[in-house]
Image (spheres, rainbow, N blue to C red):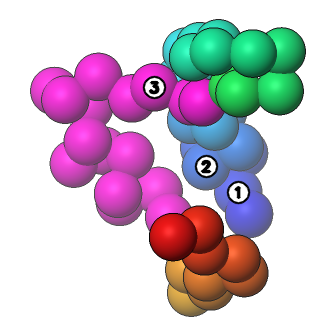
Amino acid sequence: MTSKETTFLYRPVNQNVGGAIHNEFWVPAEELDEFNSNIVGRIEVTRKFD
């Protein structure tokens, strides 16, 4: 990962969306294209919840 990609990771806002363990990174809609262009490698699903 380059320093540009690492820097971008710290821009989204960490929001608590419920209990203490329910945190999400929020990316503003107007920044989604830039966010997507900074994804490096494959995205792998590790768990899913029904």
Label 1 sits on a secondary structure element that is: loop
Q: Quadrant of residue 7?
A: top right
Provide residue 2's location: percent of width, then percent of height: 70, 57
Toward which corner of the image does residue 14 lie, by quadrant? top right
Where residue 22 appears, as percent x and y from the top left, is 71, 27
Instruction: Measure how far apart labels 2 and 1 are at the Cα level.
Output: 5 Å
- Residue under label 1: 2
* Left or right relative to 5: residue 21: right
Amino acid type assigned to the residue bearing label 2 in the image: Glu
The residue type indicated by label 1 comes to Thr
Residue 37 visible in the current orientation:
yes
Q: Say the numbered circle drawn on residue 15.
A: none
Boundaries of the magenta span: 24-40
Give the percent coordinates (x, y) of residue 50.
51, 70
- Residue 29 in magenta stretch: yes
Which residue, given by chain and number where applicable, does mark 2 sit on?
Answer: 5
